Amino acid sequence: MRVLVALGGNAMTGPDGSARPEDQIAAAEVAMASVADLVAEGADVVLTHGNGPQVGNLLVKNEISANVVPPVPLDWCGAQTQGTLGFILLNALERALVSRGVQRQAAAVVTRTLVDRHDSAFDEPTKPIGRYLSRADAEVLMQHGQTFEERGAKGWRRLVASPQPLEILDAGVVATLADCGYLVVANGGGGIPVVRGDDGTLHGVEAVIDKDLGAALLARCVAADRLLIATDVDAAILRYGKPDAEPIAEVTVDTMRKYAEEGHFARGSMGPKVEAICRFVEASGKPGVITSLTNIVPGVRGETGTIVVPRS
Ligand code: ADP
Ligand code: MG
């Protein structure tokens, strides 16, 4: 059984979103305990992860130190967080495996995700990133071509494009490592977004890819038997936040798509997870699971969480 586990923000930051190194290491240790339990059951695991708070912090450093060290582009921030988070996840995973007496090698791979430079997302950036700025600070950056949105009392926030992931260019390496028995961490933050120019060469772009949509693509590339999206809720919920809210257990992909159309899943959070799971199930004919980090093992067994299955 090969499982692609996509880790959300709660796997790499403190419960209150704190992102000091010790908070990130502590969160990774909790997350890797669940992953090691899955590995101990004999599963092949490929991990991917979000990077929103970490990239946000790098952008702040960019701004504050711009007069001292050259700011780096957003795709570089993506690459840097794949490296750092890959490193802390490997350390935590290896420690959790040792304490369970499990001998498995792990590796982290920096991966690039191809997007279409004509993707309509580039015409209308929608993904908020980084910290809130004053109007004056935002105006300086807008003169440099960035897009900002006024968000009420909190101030102005940068918006970037979130194009569709088309191909994970380094997926072959990930699949080869997994086939050789490695546990692999890859495609963090949905992958470093790159576009192909007219001359065929690749270039990084100022964009962010949804990590769950990237996970769905990676799951197919490594022929995963399950895509499990591990987040901070036990299941996707109908009528979320309402008095008659109801968790979704096993459901067909067609019904899940109908729920999505009815607007049950928020756009910036549960929506992309549901879309990612549906894409994976439709393309692979294998189940997809949305559950909490601590329920990874029963989730893979189909005992808990939202289990999306192909047409019954
Ligand atoms: P992650 O950091 O794991 O990617 P997100 O914060 O993006 O997680 O998404 C998980 C959040 O989605 C939950 O904490 C919940 O607040 C929100 N959410 C929105 N709609 C729903 C829904 N219908 N069912 C469950 N959670 C939902
Ligand atoms: Mg979150």
Image (tube, helix red, strand yellow):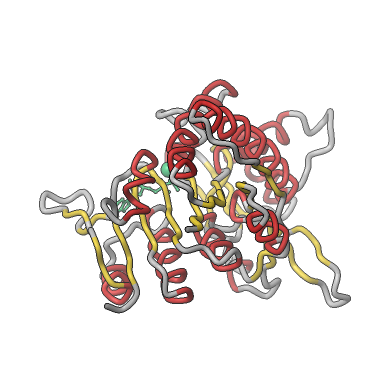
**At which x and y percent is residue 3?**
48, 55
Q: In this view, which residue lies farthest toward the right?
A: 199
**At which x and y percent is residue 254?**
30, 77
Quadrant occupied by the C terminus = bottom left
Picture quadrant of residue 168: bottom right
Picture quadrant of residue 170: bottom right
Give left or right: position of 95 versus 3.
Answer: right
**At which x and y percent is residue 173?**
72, 59
Residue at position x 71%, y 64% in the image? 172
Residue at position x 56%, y 28% in the image? 98
Residue at position x 41%, y 47% in the image? 230
Tell me if residue 98 comes above or below residue 191 in the rendering: above
Numbered circles on residues, count: 0
Give left or right: position of 37 versus 191.
Answer: left
Tell me if residue 204 comes above or below residue 120 in the rendering: above
Nearer the observer, 97 or 126: 97
Tell me if residue 257 comes above or below residue 212 in the rendering: below
**At which x and y percent is residue 270?**
37, 55
